């Protein structure tokens, strides 16, 4: 009985030992715990040594470490040496959130990509989707430089013609459709992207653009956690349009025998760089404090996040505070779990009127000073649309405050063995208040004495989910059954807004509309909000079957009903079926030692797209249609504003997905490859022309068209080097997609093509630049065919009949000229670790798309240099080229790019003392380098919507960010 | 026990009762909550008038005026090229894809379908005197929309009911004529008669006088529309209007078109009211005034330079002391106090072909009469300051001081039919063969009628008058009131071309162009429609 040490009266005994890996390297921070008594535990130190006091009678201890197989061993008196082996199946045991449940990666049969917080992009992000940019095959995320606009996210190619209806569906901690503003990027621990319909069909009518499941940090029993993350970053403009300065412009005019025209203020001999006058370095800061902890019956977590970004345009900024708390308590022998989560987010934004501002930033004459000698801003209001850019910033204020909150309560009851009932109820409330003030000197409110707007709107969403999960194992057969009900009600746009004008001075801005002097009733303008209530009710079920994890099968069905669809089409069925075969479990592959895991999956499902429907999309509706004279007064006329369509329903997407998941060389190489065929039918277009001899509004919204996307996605993750001091992990993802509009007609409504992208421009009002056409992808360009310059230096164009002219052609001379869809999207991430340093280099890019540089076209008017600034490009055009500005395929450029998007160098201090577990210092540079032939500001344009690939005038400048951050874990 | 719990739970989950998808509508008018009250019915007719005002002075005006010598909209260094739509009007080279052809068809039939919808709505309400008047009001407006469609497109579908279940077919022009005639004749007895007491109440709305004047207009064009002359009927309905004593020529010609015009104008039979902010659509000042003159008239300076009249049309304004001559802006410009309108500029900005050195110069703004196109761009005057000031501008619809910089719309109401037009129609009908008639004690011969017009505008009287001279008098009296195309076609002069120096394009003079084509989009949507001949 020599096990008992000298202090035997204390009823504990001490176990000592050293923990090492297979190469003999000590493992620090491995957990050593008493079996059946998890509160008795300790961590190994930097030498891998531990000393644990366990109660007398403890027979075994368990040693565990992330990424390694846990080992149990008997308590003994001598110091033990414990060798831990790398876990090769760790990846496959990763839990994937699948919608109303979880499954392990090993058993899923659909195309799901999971990213953990370690894989996320780093940077000063205001939107969680930026964490994923370039990291998920098939997910095309594009972000313009504007921090106030969310990036556009498209999964597996565009599948709708409606603006704003391309976004994937977000489920945040199980709350479907929760708002992304409620999540601080630092709080997210993993994101699962459900890509194919066999995975997304469980979300029915909202899921055809993909489902992104966001999981935030939860507490766990037995570990308390306190962390503080902070960073500061600087955004610098990385590229802008090169315009002439005042001296160069005068020289250019003199060289061509011209002079400035316009008001006499146009030439006081100055040289002003307007881009420099209104832009600055943007600064962002972020603080995040998170706590979590708990014991075996209670877990809790809380966090507070504060993010502030001062934009690169002077006076713009965004700040957001998010506070989050959650508690979960178990009762009745852990068979009953109740929890509550609360999040509140407050955002304040100050913005400018971008299209006006960026237009003038480029056009405004560089030959004048910002201010006149008497201090007032230099302005020339006789010219429409021409305003001093500094004036636009100083005289206009646009403030928005958004307050969002989400409260969710849930319970989970383990009713019988294997049977769990879950109920969740959440309420999300959003309040948006806006104030706009255009002061008495503003170009946007000429002769009004200042114009003010104040408005406030609130919306709320309630979701109730109630479902049963049943897991049953019979021998080697595993069954999982899900049966559930969901009820959701969204209430939008409850609020009002009013605009008035005529203030005696500007000092109160929009704060007191009572003091305005509008003059006539026409100057008091009320918003016309449409309060709408949308209700969704669903029933759903799913069956998973697995035989020895070798043969897998899943089937699901969801029945969705929405109040937004036409009266004839309220309910729909969304089925999905998929199967998987673990080839590596078969005997014929048992000898392939290099192959750890190989799974073949195939799945087919149908899901719907009901984004963009509100309660009034399908019904006959009256609205205010102007005013009419009646007995001395001007009264509001009320007339039909929309034809009804009782047959209007969701767009429906069916996806066939075939893929392989593999893991080779003891986990050193893993990945998956998927092929998919995505067909969307009942495509909605809201401008189907109808004969006005039959309807009184000349267009109707109807489900008619068909679209197809097919493609291949490949993801490879590899551990190229793994030594004790140095490791190198690399992952690459590639995706191709081919988009084709199959049809725009059915037997009731016919369209051969839809002209879109009415860009305007000098003498080109009413001209379109893209067409949606059967047999072509979305974003197909229809442009005049530029044939170079003639002998006089004038641009020439080829007409439809083949003749070449040096004047403006007609719209009938447009020709199809390429499209905006990329052929290949890729991302390549490399992480190097050398002792405590780590370096991440992330590249991503796009290949094979075209961009219409209409910004340059609109500026390219040499003759206008008498009264507008011109870019350096234009100073090389012949002055007499009087059609140089016409939008044509001359300005259709190759949009391919490769960007070194993220370079992060970090250093970890481990085990500083008893209290501080880790300090990490890191520095990140984003947009380090961009390789592209595109001559515009940046080839990464928002690619969502009906008219992708067009760079037209109001594009926010691109920035490069330098960030320094510290992360402390206690 | 446990099994019972399980069963209960399954029952709860699987049959969860709420499957109700009907949600309340809170802030929109839909069929369940509108129209209900008397004020609702009045508001529900409102869109008819809003529809009328929305395009009458812009797109409708362009079809009826840019296709004639009365108005021209040339390009200026590529500005105002706009796909060629204005030069197509001038040269009569429009196609079935022309944007005005498409939009005005939709505008007209939008109005007609709104009328049909209102008629079916009113039919359902209980009988009353107000209902009879409302039905008559809507039917007259429908007839008016049909008249405009008849005049523009000729062979159009007749749609009389709402909802429209089958696609309508094309009706021949003569059948549409008969329909309009029958409608107006049946409803005008139910329309109110305008008096000085109810002038404001019925301003902007159809009155008995309007229906009768419209019938007169229909009849005088009968020969051009259907081949069957109806000049006696023209005279008869002109007399109904004149004899009613509801209308009298205003002593001040300019007041009829001034920004303050309204129900106090005694000669206007039907007008479309406009307001700079609330009823927008009146854009004469925006399109037809030069920015350099805006300070003189006290309006915002961001007006366009585009539209003017032709020099040969202006040459018709040759009568001495005719107040109508002053509705054109031409020549060197002066402020109201007599001082010149100086504009400081540079010599090459003023004239791009200036041969000397580009230096500062002070130029008195001068509106130049003769248009001359430059080579290079089609139908283009160039855009130096002189080119911007070329083209005689109209101030008949006097620039409105209430114009806002943001919208650039004026408040001058647009007269559609007025007493002066009725006098001239009667004179023309008599010259074409109808018998002269007396109203009251006065035998109204063409000379008598024309002299009423001449006297009012302060110029010489006539002792004899011929048909071509009636056309010229109509030009002087009714310029820019959307009747020129209608007049020229009736007089057979629509195809007369007045070439402009430098214009490389020529007018298409074929006669099928006297009606516009059915829009290509409508033909595609309704295969039962038949395109007009030779399109």
Image (cartoon, coloured by chain):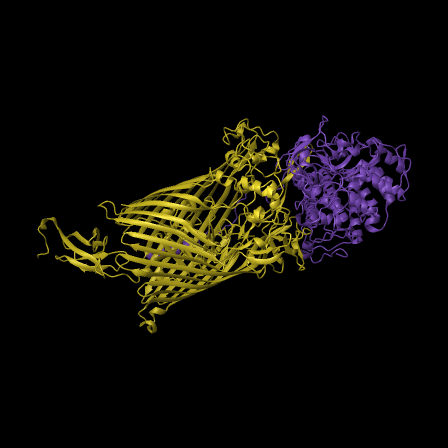
Chain colours: A yellow, B purple
- Which residue is the extreme one toward the bottom? A588
Query: Left of A964 or right of it: where is B463?
Result: right
Residue B478 on image: x %, y %: 79, 38
Q: Nearer the viewer, residue A29 or B228?
A: A29
- Which residue is the extreme one toward the front? B356
Q: Nearer the viewer, residue A673 or B395?
A: B395
Could one spot residue B524 in this view of the protein?
yes
Residue A718 on image: x %, y %: 34, 61
Could one spot residue B236 in this view of the protein?
no
Query: Left of A813 or right of it: where is B241?
Result: right
State the count of labels.
0
Q: Nearer the viewer, residue A790 or A645?
A: A790
Query: Left of A84 or right of it: where is A717?
Result: right
> In which image quadrant can residue B75 be found?
top right
Q: Residue at x 83, y 36 (%)?
A: B318
> In which image quadrant can residue B387 be found?
top right
Residue B506 on image: x %, y %: 76, 51
Residue A544 on image: x %, y %: 39, 62
Q: Nearer the viewer, residue A861 or B524?
A: A861
Q: Is residue A744 above or below residue A548?
A: above
Which quadrant: the C terminus of chain A? top left
> In which image quadrant can residue A347 be found?
top left
Q: Residue at x 47, y 45 (%)?
A: A146
Which quadrant: the N terminus of chain A? bottom left
């Amino acid at each position: 009985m020599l096990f008992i040490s000298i202090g035997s009266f204390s009823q504990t005994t001490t176990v000592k030992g050293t923990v090492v890996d297979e190469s003999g390297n000590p493992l620090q921070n491995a957990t050593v715990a008493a079996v059946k008594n998890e509160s008795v535990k300790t961590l190994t130190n930097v030498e891998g040594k531990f000393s644990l006091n366990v109660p007398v009678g403890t027979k075994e201890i368990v040693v565990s470490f992330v990424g390694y197989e846990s080992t149990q061993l008997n308590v003994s008196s001598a110091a033990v040496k414990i060798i831990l082996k790398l876990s090769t199946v760790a990846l496959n045991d990763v839990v994937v959130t699948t919608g109303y449940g979880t499954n392990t990666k090993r058993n899923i049969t659909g195309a799901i990509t999971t990213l953990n917080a370690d894989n996320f992009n780093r940077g000063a992000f205001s939107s969680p989707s930026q964490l994923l940019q370039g990291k998920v095959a098939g997910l095309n995320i594009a972000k313009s430089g504007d921090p106030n606009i969310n990036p556009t996210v498209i999964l597996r190619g565009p599948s709708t013609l409606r603006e704003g209806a391309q976004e994937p569906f977000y489920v945040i901690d199980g709350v479907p459709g929760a708002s992304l503003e409620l999540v601080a990027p630092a709080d997210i621990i993993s994101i699962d992207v459900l890509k194919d319909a066999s995975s997304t069909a469980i979300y029915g009518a909202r899921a055809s653009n993909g489902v992104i499941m966001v999981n935030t940090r939860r507490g766990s029993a037995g570990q308390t956690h306190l962390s503080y993350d902070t960073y500061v970053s600087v955004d610098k403009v990385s590229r802008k349009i090169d315009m002439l300065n005042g001296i160069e412009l005068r020289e250019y005019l003199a060289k061509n025998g011209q002079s400035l025209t316009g008001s006499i203020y146009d030439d006081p001999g100055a040289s002003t760089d307007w881009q420099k006058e209104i832009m600055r370095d943007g600064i962002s800061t972020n603080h995040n404090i998170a706590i979590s902890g708990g014991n075996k019956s209670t877990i809790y977590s809380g966090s507070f996040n504060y993010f502030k970004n001062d934009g690169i345009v002077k006076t713009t900024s965004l700040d957001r505070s998010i506070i989050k708390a959650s508690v979960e308590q178990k009762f009745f022998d852990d068979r009953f779990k109740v929890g509550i989560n609360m999040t509140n987010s407050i955002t304040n934004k100050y913005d400018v009127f971008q299209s006006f501002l960026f237009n003038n930033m480029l056009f405004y004459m560089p030959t004048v000073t910002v201010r006149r000698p008497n201090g007032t801003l230099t302005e020339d209001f006789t010219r429409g649309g021409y305003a001093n850019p500094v004036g636009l910033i100083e005289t206009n204020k646009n403030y928005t405050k958004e307050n969002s909150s989400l409260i969710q309560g849930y319970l989970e009851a383990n009713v019988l063995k294997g049977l769990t009932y879950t109920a969740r109820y959440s309420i999300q409330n959003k309040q948006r208040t806006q104030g706009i003030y255009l002061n008495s000197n503003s170009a946007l409110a000429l002769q009004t004495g200042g114009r003010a707007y104040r408005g406030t709107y609130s919306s709320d969403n309630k979701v109730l989910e109630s479902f049963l999960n049943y897991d049953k194992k019979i021998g080697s057969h595993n069954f999982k059954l899900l049966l559930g009900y969901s009820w959701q009600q969204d209430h939008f746009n409850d609020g009002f807004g009013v605009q008035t004008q005529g203030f005696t001075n500007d000092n109160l801005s929009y704060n007191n509309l009572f003091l305005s002097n509008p003059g006539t009733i026409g100057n008091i303008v009320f918003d016309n909000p449409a309060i709408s209530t949308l209700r969704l009710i669903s029933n759903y079920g799913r069956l998973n079957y697995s035989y020895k994890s070798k043969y897998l099968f899943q089937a699901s069905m969801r029945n969705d009903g929405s109040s937004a669809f036409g009266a004839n089409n309220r309910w729909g069925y969304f089925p999905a079926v998929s199967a998987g075969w673990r080839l590596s479990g078969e005997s014929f592959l048992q000898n392939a030692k290099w192959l750890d895991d190989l799974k073949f999956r195939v799945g087919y499902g149908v899901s719907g797209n009901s984004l963009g429907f509100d309660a009034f999309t399908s019904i006959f509706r009256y609205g205010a249609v102007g005013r009419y004279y009646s007995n001395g007064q001007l009264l509001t006329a009320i007339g039909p504003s929309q034809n009804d369509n009782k047959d209007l329903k969701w767009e429906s997407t069916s996806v066939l997905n075939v893929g392989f998941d593999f893991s080779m060389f003891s986990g050193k190489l893993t990945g998956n490859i998927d092929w998919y065929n995505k067909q969307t039918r009942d495509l909605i277009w809201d401008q189907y022309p109808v004969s006005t001899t039959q309807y009184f509004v000349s267009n109707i919204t109807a489900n008619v068209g068909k679209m197809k996307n097919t493609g291949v996605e490949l993801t490879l993750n590899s551990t190229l080097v793994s030594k004790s001091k140095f490791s190198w992990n690399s992952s690459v993802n590639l995706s191709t997609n081919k988009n084709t509009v199959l049809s725009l007609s059915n037997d009731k409504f016919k369209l051969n093509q839809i002209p879109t992208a009415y860009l305007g421009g000098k003498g080109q009002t009413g001209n379109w630049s893209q067409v949606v056409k059967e047999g072509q992808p979305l974003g197909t360009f229809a442009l005049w065919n530029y044939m170079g310059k003639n002998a006089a230096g004038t641009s020439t164009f080829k007409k439809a009949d083949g003749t070449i002219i040096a004047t403006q052609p007609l719209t009938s001379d447009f020709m199809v000229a390429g499209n905006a869809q990329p052929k290949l999207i890729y991302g390549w991430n490399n992480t190097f670790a050398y002792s405590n340093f780590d370096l991440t280099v992330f590249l991503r890019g796009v290949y094979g798309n075209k961009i219409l540089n209409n910004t340059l076209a609109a500026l390219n008017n040499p003759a206008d240099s008498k009264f507008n600034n011109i870019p350096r490009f234009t100073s090389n055009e012949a002055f007499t080229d009087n059609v140089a500005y016409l939008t044509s395929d001359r300005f259709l450029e190759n949009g391919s790019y490769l960007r070194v998007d993220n370079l992060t160098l970090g250093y970890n201090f481990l085990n500083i003392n008893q209290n501080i577990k880790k300090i990490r210092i890191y520095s990140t540079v984003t947009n380090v380098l961009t390789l592209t032939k595109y001559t515009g500001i940046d080839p990464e344009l928002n690619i969502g919507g009906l008219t992708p690939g067009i760079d037209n005038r109001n594009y926010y400048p691109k920035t490069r960010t330098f960030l320094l951050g510290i992360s402390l874990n206690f | 026990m446990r099994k019972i719990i399980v069963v209960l739970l399954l029952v709860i989950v699987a049959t969860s009762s709420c499957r109700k998808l009907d949600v309340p509508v809170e802030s929109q008018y839909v069929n369940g909550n509108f129209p209900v009250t008397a004020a609702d019915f009045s508001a529900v007719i409102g869109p008819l008038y809003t529809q009328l005002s929305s395009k009458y002075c812009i797109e409708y005006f362009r079809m009826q005026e840019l296709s004639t010598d009365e108005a021209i909209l040339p390009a200026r260094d590529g500005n105002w090229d706009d796909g060629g739509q204005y030069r197509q009007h001038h040269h009569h080279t429009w196609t079935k894809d022309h944007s005005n052809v498409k939009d005005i068809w939709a505008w007209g039939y939008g109005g007609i379908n709104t009328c049909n919808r209102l008629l079916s709505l009113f039919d359902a309400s209980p009988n009353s005197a107000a209902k009879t008047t409302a039905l008559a009001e809507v039917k007259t407006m429908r007839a008016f929309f049909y008249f405009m469609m008849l005049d523009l497109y000729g062979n159009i579908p007749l749609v009389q009911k709402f909802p429209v279940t089958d696609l309508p077919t094309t009706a021949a022009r003569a059948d549409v004529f008969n329909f309009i005639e029958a409608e107006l004749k049946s409803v005008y007895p139910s329309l109110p008669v305008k008096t000085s007491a109810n002038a404001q109440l019925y301003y902007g709305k159809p009155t008995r006088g309007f229906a009768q004047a419209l019938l007169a207009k229909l009849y005088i064009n009968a020969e051009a529309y259907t081949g069957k002359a109806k000049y006696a009927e023209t005279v008869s309905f002109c007399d109904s209007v004149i004899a009613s004593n509801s209308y009298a020529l205003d002593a001040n010609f300019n007041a009829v078109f001034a920004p303050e015009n309204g129900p106090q104008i005694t000669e206007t039979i039907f007008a479309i009211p406009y307001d700079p902010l609330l009823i927008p659509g009146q854009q004469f000042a925006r399109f037809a005034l030069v920015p350099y003159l805006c300070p003189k008239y006290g309006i915002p300076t961001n007006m366009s330079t585009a539209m003017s009249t032709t020099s040969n049309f202006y040459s018709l304004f040759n009568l001495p002391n005719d107040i109508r001559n002053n509705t054109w802006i031409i020549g060197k410009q002066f402020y109201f106090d007599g001082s010149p309108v100086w504009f400081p500029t540079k010599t090459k900005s003023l004239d791009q072909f200036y041969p000397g050195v580009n230096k500062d110069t002070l130029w008195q703004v001068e509106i130049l009469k003769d248009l001359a196109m430059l080579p290079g761009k089609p139908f283009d005057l160039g855009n130096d300051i002189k080119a911007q000031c070329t083209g005689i501008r109209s101030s008949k619809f006097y620039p409105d001081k209430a114009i806002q910089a943001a919208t650039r719309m004026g408040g001058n109401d647009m007269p559609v039919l007025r007493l002066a037009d009725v006098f001239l129609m009667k004179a023309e009908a008599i010259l074409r063969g109808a018998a002269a008639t007396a109203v009251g004690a006065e035998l109204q011969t063409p000379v008598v009628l024309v002299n009423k017009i001449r006297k009012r505008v302060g110029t010489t009287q006539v002792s004899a008058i011929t048909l071509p001279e009636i056309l010229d008098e109509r030009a002087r009296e009714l310029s820019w009131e959307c009747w020129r195309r209608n007049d020229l076609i009736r007089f057979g002069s629509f195809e007369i071309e007045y070439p402009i120096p430098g214009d490389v394009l020529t007018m298409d003079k074929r006669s099928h162009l006297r009606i516009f084509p059915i829009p290509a989009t409508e033909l595609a949507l309704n295969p039962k429609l038949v395109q007009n001949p030779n399109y």
